[in-house]
């Protein structure tokens, strides 16, 4: 069985060589069992020498295949490129910063041989700040009430995929991709095991609070239209409340006569309704924007450099 290691990279010049050394060790452990390995590294428009390191690795190891983007297109595009270029019977998706331990690859392969099409590594939250743990649990509890697939807390991109899962994911051509949801959507037999997360070997994570928030919104909007339905329900509820309030005002005027309306009540009502309208317009705008990007049909990424022969399967 040929196993492809797919690793998106962004400014990983300090750690990429060490990462490759460790996945090589994992490959050497699997070689006596009849499994070979290839390494697919995707440079997501890095600003450092990540591409140069990839070229050096490819010169020393013929199993290394690299792809470099013309600019930073984001991790989802890099992951898609890696899956398109992977030729293995199974594909292991992992980060190049060594937070995904390469020594777990053998365990993934063993579980794959038991018949599982997806072998998912679930990170434990041991050692995480309490606020982060509670926020994550609250987010996943909320999202799983809304989306059409189940998203598990602690589960990211670190997983092994069979060839038929990879082909199924590649057949989904939407522009706004949320891979964690796509992996869950395609289904197929899956198993999960837990592992202790490791610290980054070098550098700092590019995931800021803003990018995490945007990623969470993508997960919420990519697999359902319930926010739009919620906007409709909220509008109908506000209309009902307005009708009841109008009836109450008319009734009070008939019984007690016309009174001067309260200034605070009017300002509060106007401000609240304006805020609700802006939120609903934002929700509609998010969906409209996604339609806009889908209709344009632009490629997910553009390749600047690669050592892979160009075929119709590799064109974005």
Image: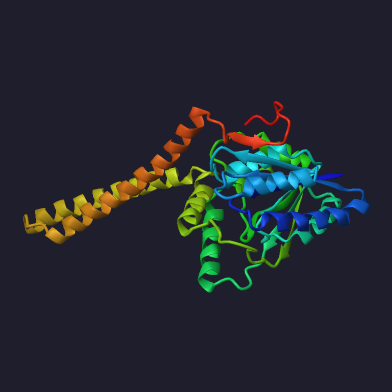
Depicted 8 relative to depicted 299: above or below: below
Depicted 127 relative to depicted 188: above or below: below
Image-quadrant location for residue 268: bottom left
Outermost residue on the top side: it is 312
Residue 200 location, x and y as percent? 63, 63
User: How are the residues colored?
Assistant: rainbow
Q: Is residue 96 visible?
A: yes
Residue at 48 percent across and 34 percent down: it is 293
Residue 34 location, x and y as percent? 92, 48
Image-quadrant location for residue 88: top right
Residue at 80 percent across and 54 percent down: it is 24
Residue at 86 percent across and 52 percent down: it is 114
How many marks do you count on the picture? 0
Q: Is residue 188 visible?
A: no
Depicted 138 relative to depicted 93: above or below: below
Seen from the viewer's position, the closer of residues 19 and 184 is 19
Seen from the viewer's position, the closer of residues 70 and 133 is 70
Q: Quarter of the image containing the C terminus?
A: top right
**Is residue 110 rendered to the left or right of residue 169?**
right
Residue at 49 percent across and 53 percent down: it is 211
Seen from the viewer's position, the closer of residues 298 and 250 is 298
**Is residue 307 rendered to the left or right of residue 217?**
right
Q: Quarter of the image containing the N terminus?
A: top right
Seen from the viewer's position, the closer of residues 97 and 260 is 97
Residue 290 location, x and y as percent? 47, 37
Residue 216 location, x and y as percent? 51, 53
């Amino acid at each position: 069985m040929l196993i492809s290691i797919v690793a998106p990279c962004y400014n990983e010049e300090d750690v990429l060589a060490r990462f490759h050394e460790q996945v090589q060790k994992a490959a050497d452990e699997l070689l006596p069992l009849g499994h070979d390995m290839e390494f697919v590294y995707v440079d997501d428009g890095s600003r450092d020498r990540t591409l140069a390191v990839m070229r050096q690795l490819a010169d020393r190891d013929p199993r290394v295949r690299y792809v470099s983007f013309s600019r930073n297109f984001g991790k989802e595009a890099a992951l898609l490129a890696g899956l398109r270029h992977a030729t293995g019977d199974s594909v292991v998706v992992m980060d190049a910063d060594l937070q995904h331990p390469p020594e777990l690859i053998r365990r993934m392969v063993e579980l794959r041989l038991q018949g599982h099409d997806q072998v998912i590594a679930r990170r434990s939250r041991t050692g995480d700040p309490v606020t982060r743990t509670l926020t994550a649990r609250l987010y996943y509890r909320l999202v799983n009430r809304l989306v059409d697939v189940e998203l598990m807390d602690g589960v990211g991109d670190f997983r092994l995929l069979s060839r038929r899962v990879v082909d199924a994911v590649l057949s989904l051509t939407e522009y706004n991709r949320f891979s964690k949801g796509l992996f869950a959507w395609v289904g197929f037999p899956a198993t999960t095991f837990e592992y202790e997360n490791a610290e980054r070997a070098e550098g700092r994570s590019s995931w800021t609070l803003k990018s995490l928030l945007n990623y969470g919104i993508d997960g919420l909007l990519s697999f359902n239209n319930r926010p739009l339905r919620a906007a409709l329900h909220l509008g109908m509820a506000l209309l009902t409340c307005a009708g009841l309030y109008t009836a109450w005002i008319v009734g009070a005027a008939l019984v007690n006569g016309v009174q001067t309306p309260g200034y605070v009540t009017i300002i509060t009502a106007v401000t609240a309704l304006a805020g609700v309208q802006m939120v609903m317009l934002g929700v509609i705008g998010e969906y409209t924007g996604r339609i806009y990007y889908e209709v344009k049909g632009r490629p997910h990424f553009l390749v600047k450099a690669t050592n892979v022969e160009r075929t119709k399967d590799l064109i974005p």
